[in-house]
């Protein structure tokens, strides 16, 4: 309803007082070149929201005692990030769910000298051993509940699906292969995805993206050359429209438009980790830990 004249006058007086306090406080962003937004304390009650547009320039590391909040593209969608004074970027407001590893996964399937080197609640190490043509794989149970709004043994790839994990290739051989995927079923063995899913394929130390759109599997060109025994943080983002992006230690390393975009087949919902040494009498092994998933 319209304000009465006396109410308008009262508000103008209050606004003048706040502006005077603001000028006296010397806290305006115009006098603080390090600030990216004005201090709202002196404006009184602010009933609004803040819109963050993708920054045209990547924010640099702020000085000591300063943190920066901003939006940037992440998997074809603007996400809110925070960078601290050490330069570390934090992705905010993702509904991560932890995925228990080794001790909750069914027993591994192995050939030759393939084995689970160790398995704990938050990490697992698979090794082919040194006998040629040895393999080993392990997976989650068939009901994972990744997606909401569908049966708990279905991954709805029309939703955004994010995977976050740490891994390290501990030993490698020229014909060795490591695969990590989401989208296989409990009856699937070693090898590529055979229905909708996303993941990675590591050939010796060459990291590639691996996807299936429901018709065909596809593996990208090499996205990064890894260093043995070095830990990496991996993000995989499926945007719900068939586009998949891979991030290594916070940096985008590649994309594919051949990913899934519709609900998967019931039961094709397990995380699986494979290791094989090919025809080499040498060991290929991988450590995976801190696995998380989010979907909405």
Image (spheres, rainbow, N blue to C red):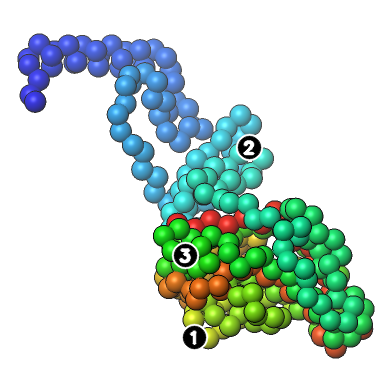
Answer with the quarter of the image where residue 242 lies.
bottom left
Residue annotated with mark 1: 215
Residue 15 pos. (x, y %): 25, 16
Residue occupying the point 36% across, 18% down: 42
Residue annotated with mark 2: 85
Res 284 visible: yes
Of the two numbered discs 1 and 3 on the same chain, state the one appearing first in sequence. Answer: 3
For residue 19, above or below residue 157? above
- In three-dimensional space, the C-alpha distance between marks 3 and 2, rounded to whole angstroms, equals 44 Å
Q: Nearer the viewer, residue 212 or 55?
A: 212
> Is 168 left, or right, of 149 in this rendering?
right
Of the two numbered discs 3 and 2 on the same chain, state the one appearing first in sequence. Answer: 2
- In three-dimensional space, the C-alpha distance between marks 1 and 3, rounded to whole angstroms, equals 22 Å
Secondary element under disc 2, as helix, strand or loop, is loop
Res 239 visible: no
Q: The C terminus appears in which quarter of the rendering? A: bottom left
Numbered tag placed on residue 198 in the rendering: none
- State which mark lies toward you, 2 or 1: 1
Residue annotated with mark 3: 151
Q: Nearer the viewer, residue 171 or 189?
A: 189
Name, please, the residue furthest toward the bottom.
279
Residue occupying the point 68% across, 55% down: 100
């Amino acid at each position: 309803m319209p304000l009465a004249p006396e109410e308008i006058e009262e508000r103008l007086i209050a606004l003048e007082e706040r502006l005077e306090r603001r000028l006296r406080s010397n806290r305006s962003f115009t006098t603080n070149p390090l600030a990216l937004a004005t201090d709202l304390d002196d404006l009184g009650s602010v009933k609004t929201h803040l819109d963050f547009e993708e920054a045209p320039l990547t924010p640099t590391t702020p000085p000591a005692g300063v943190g920066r909040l901003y939006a940037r593209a992440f998997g074809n969608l603007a996400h809110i990030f925070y960078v601290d004074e050490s330069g570390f970027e934090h992705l905010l407001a993702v509904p991560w769910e932890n995925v228990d590893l080794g001790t909750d996964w069914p027993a591994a399937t192995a050939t030759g000298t393939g084995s689970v080197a160790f398995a704990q609640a938050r990490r697992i190490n698979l090794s082919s051993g040194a006998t040629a043509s040895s393999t080993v794989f392990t997976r989650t149970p068939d009901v994972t509940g990744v997606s909401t709004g569908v049966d708990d043994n279905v991954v709805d790839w029309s939703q955004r699906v994010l995977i976050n994990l740490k891994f390290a290739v501990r030993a490698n051989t020229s014909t060795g292969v490591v695969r990590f995927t989401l989208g296989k079923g409990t009856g699937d063995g070693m090898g590529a995805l055979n229905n909708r899913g996303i993941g990675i394929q590591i050939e010796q130390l060459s990291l590639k993206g691996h996807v299936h759109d429901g018709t065909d599997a596809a593996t990208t060109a090499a996205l990064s050359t890894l260093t043995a025994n070095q830990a990496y943080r991996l993000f995989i983002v499926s945007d719900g429209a068939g586009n998949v992006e891979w991030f290594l230690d916070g940096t985008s390393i590649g994309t594919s438009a051949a990913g899934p975009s519709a609900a998967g087949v019931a039961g094709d919902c397990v995380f699986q980790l494979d290791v094989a040494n090919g025809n080499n009498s040498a060991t290929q092994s991988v450590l995976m830990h801190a696995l998380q998933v989010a979907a909405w």
